[in-house]
Image (cartoon, helix red, strand yellow):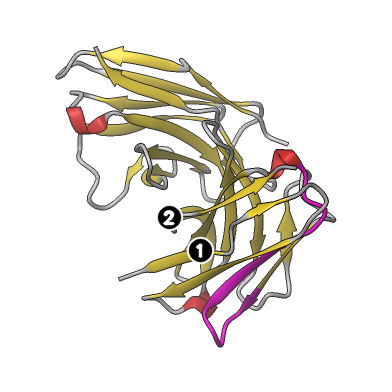
Amino acid sequence: DIVMTQSPDSLAVSLGERATINCKSSQSVLKSPNKKNYLIWYQQKAGQPPKVLIYWASTRESGVPDRFSGSGSGTDFTLTISSLQAEDVAVYYCQQHYNSPLTFGGGTKVEIK
Amino acid sequence: EVQLLESGGDLVQPGGSLRLSCAASGFNFGTYVMSWVRQAPGKGLEWVSSIATSGDDTFYAGSVKGRFTISRDNSRSTLYLQMNSLIVDDTAIYYCAKYRNDGGSHYAIFDYWGRGTLVTVSS
């Protein structure tokens, strides 16, 4: 199984400041034929189901504000919120869909400082 | 508008059984791979099972293999999860989630989720 490790477990950021979340996979999630990283970022607000933010490691989902961006390749990935807003308070998860079983990171809780 | 509505969650004793349902609407259900994903109280997300469009191919997490069975009725646009031999660690909110279909290629990008149904396994 591919293990997804997120860091930090939680972080507190001031409004308007940058938040950075890391995700590391135990093996590469980059598929050679299509050169895509099978890595997704989700946002889960309290009492709600998760919502896709980023897929293919760096493609923003339609309707997601451009302050959210994803980067990385192979085994190391980053989700960046360039200017934290109050509505961004949530838990963020990475997920690989390179192979089965599909696996998620443990989550990173983002709060306002 | 895509909607997924789970039902069937309940309090059940260890060793018991439960059947979850997910009623889908707003999209052509039979052309999408579907999944169940669970979340224990206060914990992270865990993929449980997926099923191909026709229902012929099914996939399970190791933690539920042999105990849970996923199925679908495309004529009713409904996804099911039969859960047997339940254990305390199965306690979770169970979400129904839809794969992305990109021109006939199915990707486990869960672009729509239901609100979930709570399963509690306790004596």
- Where is residue B98? Give x, y as percent: 49, 62
- Badge 1 is on which residue? B6
Give, as a single range, the part of the protein colored magenta.
B72-87
Residue pictured at 43% horizontal, 55% vertical = B115
Q: From the top left corner, tell me how far across and down residue B18 is, in percent.
A: 70, 61
Q: Is residue A11 above or below residue B26?
A: above
Q: Which residue is drawn at 39% across and 39% down?
A: A44
* Camera sees residue A28: yes
Q: Are the numbered discs 1 and 2 placed on the same chain, yes or no? A: yes
* Mark 1 to mark 2 CA distance (whole Å): 7 Å
Q: Is residue A37 left or right of residue B89?
A: left
Disc number placed over residue A23 in the picture, else none: none
Q: Nearer the viewer, residue B120 or B55?
A: B120
Residue at the location (63% across, 75% down)? Answer: B72
Mark 2: give few (<14), some (14-19) or many (20+) Cα within 10 Å: many
In the image, taking residue A51 as reference, residue B24 lies left or right, namely: right
Q: Quadrant of the C terminus of chain B?
A: top right
Query: Chain under label 1?
Result: B
The outermost residue toward the front is B123
Q: Which chain carries label 2?
A: B
Disc 1 and disc 2 in contact, CB within 8 angstroms: yes
Residue A43 locus on image (x, y percent): 37, 38
* Residue B44, quarter of the rendered image: top right
Mark found first going from the N terminus, 1 or 2: 1
The amino acid marked with disc number 2 is Arg
Which residue matches tag 2? B115
Q: Which residue is drawn at 49% across and 34% down?
A: A94
Q: Residue furthest left?
A: A16
Under mark 1, the amino acid is: Glu
Could you say where residue B14 lies in the image, as x and y percent from the top left?
79, 47
**SS state under label 2:** loop
Determine the secondary structure under disc 1.
strand
